[in-house]
Amino acid sequence: MNLAEYFAANRPKPRYQFGDRVEGTYMKIPYVGTAYTDNMRNEIEGPMVSIHLDLPMKLDGVYVNHIRVKYKDIKGLRT
């Protein structure tokens, strides 16, 4: 079994494609943005989606433009 076959069998299939518009809440803050990567870095975190925000979000006194969220923090696709 090569690596491609292993990852196809043992990793979750992505729910969001590159460029999908999404909205949801992150740390009780609503957001709207664009989905970039939908992958799983490790077994502990589980699958997550990287999102580029339309407007910056202030977290712990720092403005951020990118966040990584779990599927439960995404309400769905925005049309």
Image (cartoon, rainbow, N blue to C red):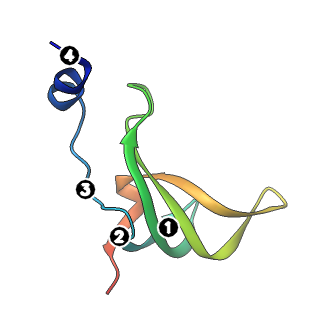
Left or right side of 4 for 39: right
Type of amino acid at the residue the image marks with label 1: Thr
Q: Position of residue 15 (x, y in %)?
A: 25, 56
Would residue 46 be seen by someone viewing this image from the given angle? Answer: yes
Dot label at residue 2: 4
Alpha carbon separation for disc pair 1 and 4: 38 Å
Task: For the N terminus, give its image quadrant.
Answer: top left
Which of the marked residues, 1 or 4, is nearer the chain's N terminus?
4
Which of the marked residues, 1 or 2, is nearer the chain's N terminus?
1
The residue at the far bottom in this view is 79
Which of the marked residues, 4 or 3, is nearer the chain's N terminus?
4
Would residue 29 be seen by someone viewing this image from the given angle? Answer: no
Label 1 environment density (alpha carbons within 10 Å; few <14, some 14–19, many ≥20): some
Which of the marked residues, 2 or 3, is nearer the chain's N terminus?
3
Q: Position of residue 2 (x, y in %)?
A: 20, 16
Left or right side of 53 for 70: left
SS label for mark 4: loop
- Callouts 1 and 2 close, C-beta under 8 Å: yes
The residue under label 3 is 15
Which of the marked residues, 4 or 2, is nearer the chain's N terminus?
4
The residue under label 2 is 75
SS label for mark 2: strand
- In the image, which is nearer the foreground, mark 4 or mark 3? 4
Type of amino acid at the residue the image marks with label 2: Lys
The residue under label 1 is 25
Alpha carbon separation for disc pair 2 and 3: 13 Å
Type of amino acid at the residue the image marks with label 3: Arg
Between 27 and 55, which is closer to the camera in this rendering?
55
Alpha carbon separation for disc pair 1 and 2: 8 Å
The mark tally for this picture is 4
Residue visible at 20% across and 25% down?
10
